Image (spheres, helix red, strand yellow):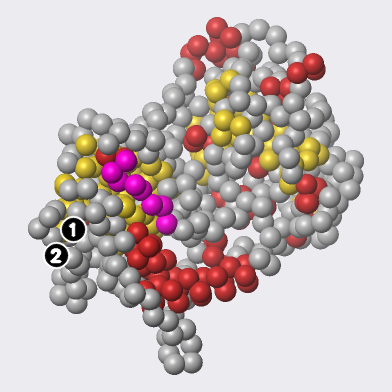
Amino acid sequence: MRTLRGNRTRVWAISAVWATCALLTSASAAADEDEHYSPYERPRSGVTVYDMPAIINGDDSHIAAPVRQPNFDALDSFKGPAPEPDLENKGQTPEGWVQMGNVVMPEDVALGLKQVDPEPSPAWEDIEGNQYPRKHTVYLNFQGSPLLAGGPDNSAEDRSTLARWEPYPAYTGGNNNALAIIQSVEEDLGPFGLRVKYLERPNKTVPYTMAMIGGSWTDINLDSPAGGVAPGADCEARGQRHVVYAFGLTSSSTVNQELAHAWGLDHIFGSDMIMSYQGTGNKDFGTSCRTLCEEACQGPNSIGCNAIHQKYCPVGEQHDTVELNFVFGSNEPDTEPPVVDIVEPADGNTYPIGSSVPIVGDVADNYGGVGWKLYVWHNENIVIDEVDYERNLSWILSNAPEGTYRIRVEAEDHADHIVGKEVTITVTDDAPATTGDPDTEGDTDAMTDGGETAGPTSGDPTIDGTDSDSDTGIDVDEGGCNCSVEHDPTSPLAAGLALFALLGLRRRRA
């Protein structure tokens, strides 16, 4: 039986001594992680704090917008020739990025000043969902979409490093050509732990790569022509929500090449290879070490994933399928749903009005790639419906007004398993100044069949679950971190410090 990765002791009353020491320990660990360079490797950013009076009084910015679903049958209405590039209105690559053929990458990588470390930093690798092998989803977008400019990429929110704040046009090749592309993409990606969607857009919760199919290179911020483009140098797909592009009427090989660029593969030689500029027609991912195409394809010193390729091949070569198998595994079905728990608060807790209520979730899955979100109802009105894109699994309901709060942490994997855990708390004038003693309140950590449900509770008209999205304990002794801070346990600072301490106590993956 799987066990959750979080520390099992509720820590609402944890002292600021431990919290401050946890912060100092985290700062020391962060310094060590500077050695692990990766432009897409983002450890947890901290704790998400919600201003509850503002949210309850009408700030709806934390309610997820509905997922825009495609109408694949309408593609014939866009049918026509490939769009002509608008050369008078072409864009330019964003600051700090350089176009190298059909790859756009961080400038320091393109100039050979930095190379991605072949081993991820411990702080990143320990985050649930980042482990390998990782199931993943590809969404083929033939419909076009308004896109938000500026990175980092977030496919679920239509945000792209290369976007131009203009709607991206639809594919003009018609239904039949689109279906032929889809079939070939499915065949090429079929051996790996990847699924392809096009009739239905994935929920925001689950991480996926989106391929925009159609349009022209001048519809995004590129300096020069390309048949497609992708953000490069994400070795071993450490980011999981990229947006890539395949222009014009295109081919499945172009689509697959841009997807694979986003996952860390570079150009190679070989007219029969998907990752090659050479040749046309039916191509495949390389099943042996193939020579990298650097100067002739991308420019000198521009292959920032060299250290990754050398894990499997001699210097200057790349093995496509071995790398894809490392990241995504094989195509066996995923029959196990995620496991979800809420470590804090305990079900039934009460808090004084104005408290800052800490929420600590715990998620585990048998594959990487799982995503999760937070729901909060206040007096049965949904006030928070938000994907935890930062993977913090830690939130604070700050300055909580009076009322009943139902809190749900919900996880989703790439086999459409949706699992959640809920607790209900009360904020009232009658609550004591502090709430509970971990030694006497009883253990709410054990998972029961009643503790997990598939989707939000029935009868909630405001939520559609299909539409939204080695221990590191701290030693404190006379020779170590010996700190003392007076604090109010209901303040946002104290709650935040407590959550940082809990994060410091999280168990690393073995």
Comes first in the chain, label 1 or label 2:
1
User: In the image, what residue type sits under mark 2?
Assistant: Pro
Q: In the image, residue 356 lies at what x, y percent?
A: 29, 57
Label 1 close to label 2 by CB (< 8 Å): yes
Residue 83 highlighted magenta (yes or no): no
Image point (25%, 57%), residue name: 355
Q: In the image, residue 468 lies at what x, y percent?
A: 37, 35
Magenta stretch, residue numbers: 47-54
Residue indicated by mark 2: 432
Residue indicated by mark 1: 352
In the rendered image, is residue 184 in sight? no
Q: Is residue 508 above or below residue 223?
A: below
Image point (48%, 92%), residue name: 479
Q: Is residue 81 above or below residue 66?
A: above
User: In the image, what residue type sits under mark 1?
Assistant: Pro
Q: Secondary structure at mark 1?
A: loop
Horizontal side, residue 69 vs residue 175: left or right:
left
Residue 465: which disc? none
From mark 1 to mark 2, how far is it between C-alphas?
A: 6 Å
